[in-house]
Amino acid sequence: MERISIRPLMSLEDFRECERIQLEVWGALGEASEVLSVTAKYGGAVIGAFASGKLAGFIYAFSARRRGQWIHWSHQMAVRPSHRDRGLGFRMKMVHRRMALAAGIRSICWTFDPLESRNATINIARLGGRAEEYVVNCYGNFASRIERGLPTDRFVVNWRIGSAEVARRLTRSGEHRLRPHTPVVNEVRAGRNGFIVNRRIHLGLGARRLLVEIPANTDEMRAKAIVLARRWRKESRRIFRHYFSRGYQAVEFLPPSRDTGGRCFYVLQRNAVRPPDARETAVRTS
Ligand SMILES: CC(C)(COP(=O)(O)OP(=O)(O)OC[C@H]1O[C@@H](n2cnc3c(N)ncnc32)[C@H](O)[C@@H]1OP(=O)(O)O)[C@@H](O)C(=O)NCCC(=O)NCCS
């Protein structure tokens, strides 16, 4: 069994190792050690997860202002593929939360690809973050091996680390149940190679809570069926932009489980910003 430890990073050697992880995970260098070093010293957090003494993942976050409030903007989190799904990402976020609260920060924000179900599991289901904004092609043409030429659309997640809601979420786990009778925005069907395809999209639904299904295997889809992956980007963009502009946010994520039949769904919730269009619009997609 590997010994895991999580701690803030301070040495140039550690920062160089973060560069290697970036190359391994994204195939490109986003933040050089110099940036990590000054951020760790003067404003933000650089945190590492060590497995048997070797760096297996890191978080890089800087201080920023959003909506008039000082926050940490967590620009990068990566865990080496060999060490994923063992809770390292979650544990680094816990350490980040402690450090940020101690520094008087109440919110940590970051972006993630809405079609990455693993990220949705950790960011929304496990941590209790909320996706508050949808940004089209956020980073433009991004030289990342994960993206594989897809537009870099992103959710902006706000993790309100000081809130009672988040504190409650962190003490519960595995409580993500599919509530019956919640309207589903996109009806899907099984396509080729085990990838799901949107069959019908309903715009203009007015219930307070709505479900949006996404594939549980987008990385594989990008590698094996890029045309379908592009179609998912286009159609999910249309759904999220439509409902976000009507006051909905993604407040829950139901990871693939026996309860969901291996499928996964965002729960969008309306926050009474603007009443939705009462007209029911159904769009057939194929
Ligand atoms: C995102 C990332 C940092 C997560 O790290 P990690 O250490 O694997 O995360 P954790 O193990 O804490 O959590 C992963 C969760 O996703 C779940 N998961 C795994 N595969 C999944 C899938 N296909 N769909 C949905 N959830 C999935 C795991 O079961 C786990 O949940 P659990 O703890 O409830 O069992 C890592 O996947 C990564 O480096 N990805 C590439 C870079 C990236 O996307 N970074 C974030 C944006 S900058």
Image (cartoon, rainbow, N blue to C red):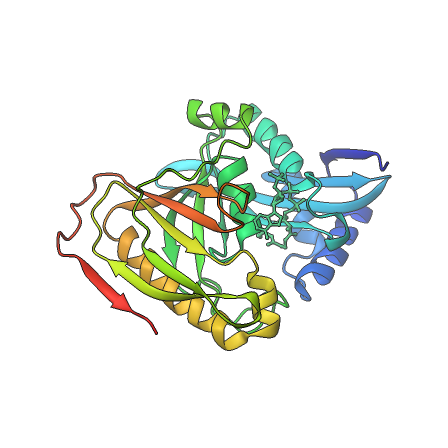
* Towards the viewer: 7 or 33: 7
Q: Is residue 73 visible?
A: no
As displayed, is residue 49 above or below residue 192?
Answer: above
In percent of width and height, residue 163 lies at 43, 25
Q: Is residue 190 visible?
A: yes
Say which residue appears at 77% left-offset and 46% top-offset. Answer: 56
Task: Please name whichever residue, 256 or 164, is drawn nearer the observer in this view of the structure.
Answer: 256
Q: Is residue 58 above or below residue 200?
A: above
The percent position of residue 67, horizontal first and vertical second, equals 35, 41
Q: Residue furthest bottom?
A: 227
Of residues 52 and 238, the one drawn nearer to the viewer in this rendering = 238
Between 279 and 68, the residue placed more toward the observer is: 279
| Horizontal side of residue 233 vs 3, given as left or right | left
Q: Is residue 100 left or right of residue 33?
A: left
So how many labels did they put on this image? Answer: 0
State the quadrant of the N terminus: top right
Compared across the picture, whether 90 is left or right of 159 comes to right
Q: Residue at 34% x, 74% y: name it.
A: 286
Whole-percent x, y for residue 204 in the image: 20, 55
Farthest-out residue, left: 278
Residue 122 image offset from top left, x and y in percent: 56, 42
- Above or below — where is 160 with respect to 181? above
Q: Which residue is located at x 66 percent, y 34 percent?
A: 91
